[in-house]
């Protein structure tokens, strides 16, 4: 929409100052008398007659709005009405191109709030099928299937309701890369497209495999990284794939076209985690460079965030504006994309171990979030998965309850409905073998979650 300066628009009066009359005084003086009378009456009625359809200042300003700005203004007015009615935490009004949530602009409160009931340990289900520790998993968009991968190089597709294995892609031995269809090295990461069409997996052999999610049929192989692939994520609503690697680079791929798009650099150490949502950007955890980065793909720029004191091993977006990360110093951090320091840091979130005086915090090995809500979860190797609630403005984390799970929690995912949480567990950490928990069972724990909508408590515990 073309804009015009406010000074050029008719505001009800053509004559705005006495100087206007002086400007034409001498011109009127030399005109014939009858002509001067006509001009006199014309200017008299134009000046002193009431303006027609006079607009308020606010309405006048709206004339300069683009269609996009109008949508945003109306959406914000609607959210203000919801807040006035006590319903301000309801999301769902889309305002901009690409389907970004307007409510995510309201950073002063979580979008949706769930009050979970503590699950009974007897209700937990263990799915076993991998021979070695589970390293990563994803839940299908319809919540009917789970895909998991392991250090045994295999991929398994599970049925959530029955717990049965539907399909298995076996791992191959080292040296059989040319003839084996699948991975021959530890699989470290996986992602599924938002329409459930494609599954992507990355391994220690620098390879990214693309699979048809329905049949687990192998489609493509992406090469280009110079070290282990440690993070994968599809941009929501598209088939654009972001990948992160121990070679410190981020790559963008188009799966539909089986094509490489671009590479970005910035981290000073191996990248250990990656996530994305609808925007054309992704977030990464930089390991021992102790930074979290937001990559703006279109602008080819990045934002750098500092806060943890140890290696940042996992990261997850809560919504388009906030994220959570975990480090081997035992801390959890809540971030806003608009602030370079954490909004909240919970130190020793899973406690400590070791002899008195030599205590060491339990590493945070996995984090997840139920998108656009206040619910997040974290895992370590202290025999429990911890659920948390984000406080007002995402400035605090309040512990809700813990769920007994023995072993290294290497991956965590909420179902899209929030009805269950899946934990990928192993006897070893997904990135190495610093410890081995012999009593742990390699597999998936499906944790049912019973919830009811509720308002958040105004006072919450800040763990900083």
Image (cartoon, rainbow, N blue to C red):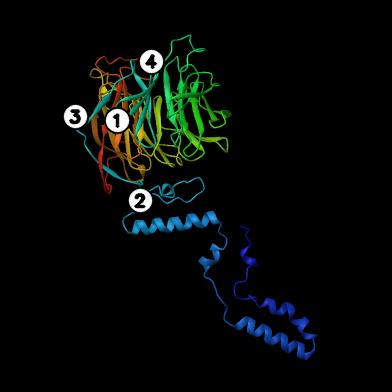
The mark found on residue 96 in the picture is none
Q: Position of residue 307 (x, y in %)?
A: 41, 32
Q: Residues within 10 Å of mark 1 (few under 14, many from 20)?
A: many
Q: Earlier in the sequence, mark 2 or mark 1?
A: 2
Q: Crowding at label 3, few (<14), some or many (≥20) Cα neighbours within 10 Å?
A: few
Residue 126 position in % (x across, y down)? 26, 25
Marks 4 and 2, how far apart at CA: 43 Å
Residue at (64% x, 81% y) in the render: 46
Image x and y of residue 365, in percent: 35, 25
The alpha-carbon separation of the residues under discs 3 and 1 comes to 25 Å
Residue 292 visible somewhere in the drawing: no
Q: Depth check: give the residue in front, 317 or 19.
A: 317
Q: Are marks 3 and 1 in contact (CB under 8 Å)?
A: no
Real-space Cα distance between discs 2 and 1? Answer: 29 Å
Q: Give yes or no for contact between labels 2 and 1 (Cβ–Cβ under 8 Å).
A: no
Circle nearer the N terminus (4, 1): 4
Quarter assignment of residue 83: bottom left
Q: Of callouts 3 and 2, which one flags the residue occurring earlier in the amino acid sequence?
A: 2
Residue depth check, mark 4 versus mark 2: number of the one nearer the observer: 4
Depicted 50 relative to depicted 165: above or below? below
Q: Mark 3 — residue?
A: 122
* Residue at image mark 1: 349
Q: Nearer the viewer, mark 3 or mark 1?
A: 3
Residue marked by disc 4? 152
- The residue indicated by pointer 2 is 90
Q: Is residue 182 above or below residue 161?
A: above
Mark 3 vs 4, N-terminal side: 3
Image coordinates of residue 235 in percent, x first then y, are 48, 36
Callout 4: helix, strand or loop? Answer: loop
In the image, 290 versus 283, the foreground residue is 283
């Amino acid at each position: 929409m073309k804009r015009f300066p406010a000074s050029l628009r008719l505001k009800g009066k053509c004559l705005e100052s006495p100087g206007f009359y002086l400007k034409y005084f001498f011109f009127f003086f030399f005109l014939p008398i009858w002509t001067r009378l006509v001009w006199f009456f014309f200017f008299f009625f134009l000046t002193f007659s009431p303006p027609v359809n006079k607009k308020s200042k606010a309405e006048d300003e709206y004339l300069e709005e683009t269609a996009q700005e109008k949508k945003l203004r109306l959406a914000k007015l609607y959210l203000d009405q919801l807040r006035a009615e006590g319903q301000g935490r309801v999301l769902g009004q889309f305002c901009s191109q690409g389907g970004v949530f307007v409510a995510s602009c309201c950073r002063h409160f979580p979008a949706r709030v769930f009050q979970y009931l503590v699950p009974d340990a007897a209700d937990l289900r263990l799915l076993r099928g991998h021979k070695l520790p589970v390293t990563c998993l994803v839940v299908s968009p319809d919540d009917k299937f789970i895909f998991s991968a392991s250090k045994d190089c295999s991929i398994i597709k599970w049925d959530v309701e029955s717990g049965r294995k539907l399909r298995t892609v076996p791992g191959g031995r080292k040296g059989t890369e040319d003839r084996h269809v699948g991975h021959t090295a530890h699989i470290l990461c996986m992602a599924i497209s938002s329409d459930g069409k494609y599954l992507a997996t990355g391994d220690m052999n620098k390879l990214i495999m693309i699979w048809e999610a329905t049949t687990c049929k192998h489609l493509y192989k992406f090469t280009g990284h110079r070290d282990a692939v440690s993070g994968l994520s599809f941009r929501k609503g598209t088939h654009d794939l972001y990948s992160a690697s121990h070679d410190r680079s981020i790559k963008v791929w188009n799966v539909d076209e089986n094509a490489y798009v671009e590479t970005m650099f910035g981290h000073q150490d191996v990248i250990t985690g990656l996530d994305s949502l609808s925007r054309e950007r992704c977030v990464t955890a930089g390991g021992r460079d102790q930074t979290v980065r937001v990559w703006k793909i279109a602008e080819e720029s990045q934002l750098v965030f500092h806060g943890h004191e140890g290696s940042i091993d996992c990261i997850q977006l809560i919504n388009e504006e906030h994220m959570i990360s975990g480090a081997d110093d035992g801390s959890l951090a809540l971030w806003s994309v608009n602030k370079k320091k954490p909004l909240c840091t919970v130190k020793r979130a899973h406690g400590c171990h070791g002899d008195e005086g030599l205590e060491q915090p339990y590493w945070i090995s996995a984090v997840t979030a139920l998108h656009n809500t206040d619910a997040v979860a974290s895992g370590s190797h202290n025999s429990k998965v911890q659920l948390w609630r984000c406080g007002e403005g995402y400035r605090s984390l309040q512990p809700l309850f813990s769920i007994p799970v023995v072993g290294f929690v290497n991956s965590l995912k909420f179902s899209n409905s929030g009805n269950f949480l899946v934990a990928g567990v192993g006897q070893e950490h997904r990135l190495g073998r610093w410890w081995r928990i012999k009593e742990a069972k390699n597999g998936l724990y499906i944790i049912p979650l019973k919830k009811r909508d509720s308002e958040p408590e105004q006072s919450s515990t800040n763990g900083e």
